[in-house]
Amino acid sequence: MTVDEFAALIHDEIGLAVTADELDRSLDQVAGWDSVHLLTLLTALERATGRSISLPDVLSAPSLGTIYTVVVGGV
């Protein structure tokens, strides 16, 4: 999964318009972000990648960029 595909997945699954350049913002700076989005994103990422993703790693991630790193780093 590329960073652009990750940003598109966020838009398609959650409805938040973020660009690859904005992924390093802290989650509390992402307009409209909440904890329900995190669970929705985790489910969508597992579906898109076809594998389990560490919930503790995602929960401790300070940004969408860190979540992306967890996802691609686990491949």
Image (cartoon, helix red, strand yellow):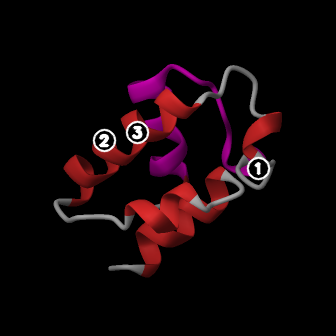
Q: Which residue lies furthest to the left in this view?
A: 50
Q: Give the range drawn in magenta.
A: 4-22
Tag 3 or tag 2, which sits nearer the N-term?
3
Splitting the image into 4 quarters, where does residue 12 fall? top left
Q: Are marks 2 and 3 in contact (CB under 8 Å)?
A: no
Q: Is mark 3 on a helix, strand or loop?
A: helix
Q: According to the image, label 2 marks what residue?
A: 44
* 17 with respect to 5 (left or right): right
Q: Mark 1–mark 3 contact, CB under 8 Å? A: no
Looking at the rendering, which quadrant does residue 18 occupy? top right
Identify residue for label 1.
21
Q: Is residue 9 above or below residue 50?
A: above
Q: Where is residue 34 in the image (x, y as percent from the top left)?
A: 61, 28
Q: Residues within 10 Å of mark 1 (few under 14, many from 20)?
A: few
Is 12 in front, or is 74? Answer: 74
Q: Mark 3 points at which residue?
A: 39
Which comes sooner in the sequence, label 2 or label 1? 1
